[in-house]
Amino acid sequence: MIHNRTSKVIDPISRKTRIRPNADSEWVIQDVPELRIIPEELWQAVQERRAQSFGTPFSRQQRPKRLLSGLGVCGICGARWIVFGKERWGCSGHRNGRGCTNSKSITTASFERRVLRGLQEKMLDPDLVKAFVTEYHQEFARRTADQAARRWKLERQIDEEGRKIQRLVAAIANGAEFDEIKSALAKAQQARERCKLELSELAAVPVIALHPEIAKTYRRQVTDLTRSLTSDEQTTLQAQTIIRSLIDQVILYPRDAER
């Protein structure tokens, strides 16, 4: 709750009372959790979701009605391709009388089939497959090295905290004032337990497997991706999301147009 956002001042000439906004530095801000309409956890979750979608066009945030909704662009005028009639796509610039000469149209089935075929051919290009395999192996090496370095650091810290605990216990046994080292002993024990917990969690993290036939697996996954479009609703939605993330836009030209 914010107080003192405004002040009442009297106009010296008209003698009328006016409301003047105060500077931010003069505001009195008080946290009143009992007046919240929604829980703090829900509010934070919404803010995180908004931050994730910030800068993304609104049309990209909505679930598309069709696989290629919002992705088709006219190669003549740059207008969006839209659906009209019975599942036919055409240039919105031409349809709305904005001077575009691209009068061609295409069915949804043919549009999607051609795009998927072209996408599959691009993704299965030998150079792209080679690049994927190289990236896969580099990621494997990086994750393996990162985990090994972190594991070594944690094991070293556990040993150091263990030796510190032994020294503190020995000091108590030799007659040192217990109250003076009680706090240090508790901190060392907590630090050691935190390291042990993180080490156990690190061991549970799966490392990318260095598959000997990764190229073949990649090709199969690309092929299966298009087949997933005819699967159950959840699988189809996941496949659509992946495919749309691979496409920036689809530029459509008439067959005889210059490019």
Image: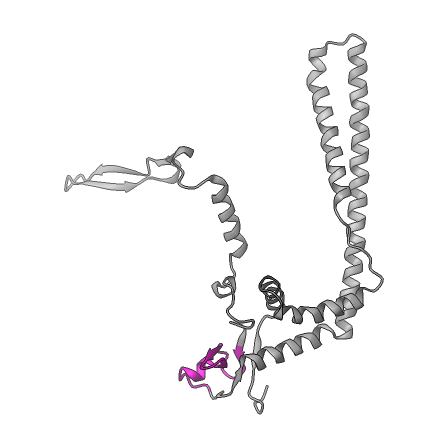
Q: Is residue 31 visible?
A: no
**Rendered view: 210 above or below 12:** below
The answer to whether residue 136 is magenta is: no
Quarter where residue 192 is shown:
top right
Q: Please state the horizontal and vertical placement of residue 155, each as a whole percent of the image.
A: 81, 35
**Residue found farthest to the front:** 232
Q: Which one is nearer the viewer's eye here, 141 or 82?
A: 82
**Rendered view: 26 above or below 146:** above
Q: Please state the horizontal and vertical placement of residue 118, each as a whole percent of the image.
A: 66, 78
Q: Residue at x 55, y 88 (%)?
A: 254
The answer to whether residue 76 is magenta is: yes
Q: Please state the horizontal and vertical placement of residue 197, each as a whole percent of the image.
A: 73, 35
Q: Is residue 237 visible?
A: yes
Q: Please state the horizontal and vertical placement of residue 184, each as a whole percent of the image.
A: 71, 20
Quarter where residue 177 is shown:
top right
Q: Which one is nearer the viewer's eye here, 62 or 143?
A: 62
Q: Give the range drawn in magenta.
A: 73-100
- On screen, residue 11 versus residue 2, left or right, reads left
- On screen, residue 156 versus residue 118, left or right, reads right
